[in-house]
């Protein structure tokens, strides 16, 4: 008999899914601005990109506030303990039907690999995108305050690199949602907030 | 018909079939202008002045009458390039101005004075003996008369005082001008008055500039949002705000960027009132929350004209994009000079002048321009086989004082002295034994032209490809017709060749894209391999017997 635990609160789920939608919108419109596809004309792409960016910034401010007031930030403290077992699981165990090595509890929602990946998004990819994006957006006013070696080109390159890193994260992240007991199990958890507790190797 | 008369068949005035239309059209325009009334109310009605009752035998007599009241007018005008045709190069200190400058169209004024002086604000300039100090030689009427006032080509800046056959024995006549009517109609200069010369540079309507032609006499809003007859109805002087007969805003020394607010009334400064910023300021866009700020920031990089003049020669008058003098002097089967027109009826060949490329609705080229223009001196060395630039627009990409500007790039092919390696001037327009248009002999024409310049001619000449750049700044379209983002922000857009900017949609870093898409591709591959292995192992497991 497995019991259920309430893993993701309503705000956390709202934050996650609206962030997902906005990031996909930003990737799509951003690649249109970049000239990778022409499914949006340039002006529309810029408008969509800018509106989505401001929405995401607003969402982020709420999310940061939430993380600190609820203490949820502690889920992202990195650890290397048992990380080898995680790697071995995804590299081998998953293929022979081994049990997932990580035991999820409300106190520690994320396995060591997730902790590292999400922390990387929060501390590296997001700041890279946001700082370069805001400089990009306000380039006309900020140009005069920038050091000599930073031109719009450098800002654009940093922003594009951030976008590619985010794209890579999204691909892997979405794929790993399928590694639950059924392919849609993890998605359901993220929608309902409830995780079934399974037996796991100790 | 107040424009300088066009003696050359290149213009619509000369073809017998088009002449009537021309007269009709001009009469219509004049009627519109007269009905719409003078451009500014005045406290003086010049029809009531005894001094202007005449009769006047010559233009000079009219000028003397004008100067009786307007005592300083001639002295003021004589300081301006409209009179001197001279201009000091602000960078090189060398003399510029129509008097000596060469261009890639009709080439040069020297030896053709009696012809070209139809556009001089004076009477009697037919050779180097002209008295530039005589106030009575100033022509007030050419700028200020609202009545029919024609300065025909060939009469050294005089109107025809009696019925005059020109060229002699040609069977073509200039009709006399009514000087009294012209004098009594004076007022501030109309667009038509300024345009009588500035619309016809290069020997025909719209030939030189591309953004100035007779369509601006009575333009609609879509052609020029400021000058539109049914709209703001600006005169030229509304922007080229003239004080003491000094007209600001010359193309010889332009204001390419003016990153300041609008000029405040009464404030003493030496800013050019003809710039867009003089009225609109440096942050002209407002209202649109999403774009106003972005567009204002574009103004740090782009001239207003770049987005707001989507094409030039938009009014139905073509401008000349190329002129090849080396094709001139060909004769038809009967050994007579001839002309050819294209399907639109625009001249493409004239035995006297060579071949032309006329174009309408031209998309400008774009370049960095800081307002200063490098004009060659007439003796600048020609390198055979190389394109010779008659002028170049200066501007360092990204420089504080430079902006990306729309320009017309004109291609010429004109004679040069192969021994002295200099461009030559030709006598073309004076009815005599040496002018090209009357004798079709390049050597004689160049000899006479060069004699007037004081430069030597070896007797040997050939043709060299030349280029000339013109600023595009008139024919400002309504805001809704301005360029859209994607006109530039795409590969192959309007600014495709412009350096010094990072243009999203045009520019990308090959290695950044390589790494980025490579990384995403690797992730997809990894995901595919991992999920494939999961599937296969799961299927095997199902197939395997349970222990």
Image: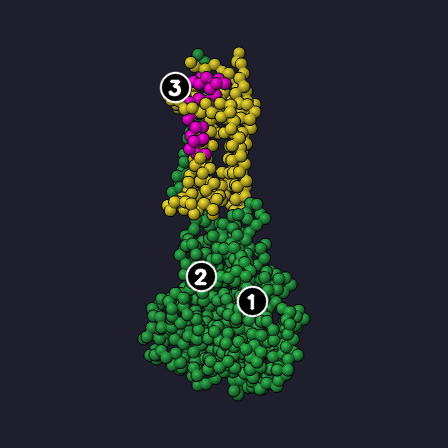
Chain colours: A yellow, B green
Residue B371 marker: 2
Q: Looking at the image, is B538 positioned above or below residue B267?
A: above
Mark 3 residue element: loop
Mark 1 residue element: helix
Residue B107 showing in the rendered view: no
What distance separates the C-alpha of mark 1 from that of mark 3?
A: 82 Å
Question: Residue A112 appears at what percent x and percent y?
Answer: 42, 22
Q: Left or right: A113 with respect to A15?
A: left
Is the residue marked by circle 2 packed among few (<14), some (14-19), or many (20+) residues within 10 Å? many
Q: Looking at the image, is B497 positioned above or below residue B159?
A: above
Residue B472 marker: none
Q: Choose mark 3 or mark 2, whichever is in front.
A: 2
Q: Choose mark 1 or mark 2, whichever is in front.
A: 1
Pointer 2 chain: B
Q: Which residues are magenta?
A: A98-126
Residue at which label 3 appears: A82
Residue B237 marker: 1
Q: Left or right: B174 with respect to A128?
A: right
Question: Residue B203 appears at what percent x and percent y?
Answer: 50, 74
- Residue with the most extreme bottom position: B169
What distance separates the C-alpha of mark 3 from that of mark 2?
A: 68 Å
Q: Nearer the viewer, residue A89 or B33?
A: B33
Mark 2 residue element: loop
Residue located at (46% from left, 17% from top): A103
Q: Left or right: B483 with respect to B463?
A: right
Question: Residue B367 appears at what percent x and percent y?
Answer: 44, 58
Residue located at (53% from left, 68% from top): B242
């Amino acid at each position: 008999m497995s019991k259920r635990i309430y893993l993701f609160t309503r705000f956390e789920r709202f934050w996650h899914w609206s962030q997902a939608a906005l990031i996909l919108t930003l990737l799509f419109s951003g690649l249109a601005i970049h000239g990778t596809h022409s499914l949006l004309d340039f002006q529309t792409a810029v408008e969509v990109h800018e509106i989505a960016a401001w929405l995401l910034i607003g969402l982020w401010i709420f999310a940061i506030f939430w993380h600190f007031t609820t203490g949820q930030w502690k889920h992202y403290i990195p650890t290397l303990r048992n990380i080898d077992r995680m790697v071995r699981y995804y590299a081998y165990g998953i293929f022979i039907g081994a049990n997932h090595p990580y035991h999820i509890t409300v106190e520690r929602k994320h396995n060591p690999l997730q902790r590292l990946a999400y922390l990387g998004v929060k501390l590296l990819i997001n700041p890279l995108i946001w700082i370069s994006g805001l400089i990009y957006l306000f380039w006309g006013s900020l140009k005069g305050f920038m050091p000599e070696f930073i031109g719009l080109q450098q800002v654009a390159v940093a922003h594009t690199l951030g976008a590619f890193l985010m794209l890579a994260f999204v691909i892997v992240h979405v794929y790993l949602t399928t590694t639950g007991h059924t392919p849609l199990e993890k998605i359901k958890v993220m929608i309902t907030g409830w995780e079934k507790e399974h037996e796991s190797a100790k | 018909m107040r424009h300088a008369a066009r003696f050359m068949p290149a213009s619509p005035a000369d073809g017998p079939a088009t002449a009537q239309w021309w007269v009709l059209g001009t009469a219509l325009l004049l009627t519109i202008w007269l009905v719409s009334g003078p451009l500014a109310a005045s406290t003086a009605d010049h029809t009531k002045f005894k001094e202007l009752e005449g009769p006047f035998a010559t233009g000079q007599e009219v000028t003397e009458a004008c100067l009786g009241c307007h005592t300083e007018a001639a002295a003021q005008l004589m300081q301006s390039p409209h009179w001197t045709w001279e201009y000091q190069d602000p960078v090189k200190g060398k003399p510029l101005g129509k008097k000596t400058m060469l261009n890639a169209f009709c080439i040069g004024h020297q030896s053709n004075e009696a012809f070209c002086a139809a556009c001089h604000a004076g009477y009697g300039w037919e050779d180097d003996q002209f008295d530039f100090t005589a106030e009575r030689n100033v022509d007030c009427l050419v700028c200020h008369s609202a009545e029919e006032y024609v300065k025909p080509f060939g009469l050294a800046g005089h109107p025809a005082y009696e019925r005059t056959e020109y060229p002699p024995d040609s069977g073509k006549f200039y009709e006399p001008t009514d000087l009294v009517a012209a004098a009594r109609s004076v007022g501030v200069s109309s667009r038509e008055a300024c345009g009588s010369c500035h619309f016809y540079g290069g020997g025909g309507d719209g030939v030189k500039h591309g953004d100035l032609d007779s369509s601006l006499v009575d333009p609609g809003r879509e052609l020029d949002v400021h000058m539109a007859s049914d709209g703001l109805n600006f005169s030229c002087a509304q922007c080229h705000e003239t004080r003491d007969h000094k007209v600001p805003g010359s193309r010889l020394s332009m204001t390419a960027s003016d990153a300041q607010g609008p000029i405040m009334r009464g404030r003493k400064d030496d800013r050019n009132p003809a710039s867009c910023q003089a009225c609109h300021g440096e942050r002209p866009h407002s209202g649109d929350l999403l774009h106003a700020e972005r567009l204002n920031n574009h103004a740090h990089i782009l001239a207003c004209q770049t987005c707001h003049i989507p094409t030039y020669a938009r009014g139905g008058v073509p401008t000349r994009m190329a002129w090849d003098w080396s094709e001139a002097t060909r004769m038809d089967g009967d050994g007579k000079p001839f002309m050819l027109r294209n399907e639109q009826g625009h001249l493409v060949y004239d035995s006297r002048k060579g071949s032309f490329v006329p174009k309408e609705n031209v998309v400008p080229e774009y370049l960095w321009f800081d307002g200063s223009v490098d004009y060659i001196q007439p003796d600048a060395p020609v390198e055979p086989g190389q394109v010779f630039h008659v002028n170049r627009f200066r501007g360092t990409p990204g420089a504080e004082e430079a902006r990306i500007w729309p320009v017309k790039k004109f291609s010429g092919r004109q004679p040069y002295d192969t021994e002295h390696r200099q461009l030559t001037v030709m006598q073309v327009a004076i009815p005599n034994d040496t002018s090209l248009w009357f004798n079709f002999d390049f050597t004689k024409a160049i000899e006479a032209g060069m004699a007037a310049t004081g430069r030597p001619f070896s007797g040997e000449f050939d043709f060299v490809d030349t280029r000339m750049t013109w600023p595009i700044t008139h024919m400002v379209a309504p805001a809704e017709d301005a360029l859209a983002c994607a006109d530039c922000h795409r590969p192959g857009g309007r600014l495709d060749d412009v350096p010094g900017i990072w243009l999203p949609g045009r520019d990308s870093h090959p290695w950044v894209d390589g790494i980025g898409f490579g990384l995403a591709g690797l992730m997809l591959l990894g995901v595919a391999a991992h999920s494939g292995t999961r599937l296969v192992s799961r299927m095997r497991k199902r197939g395997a017997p349970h222990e």
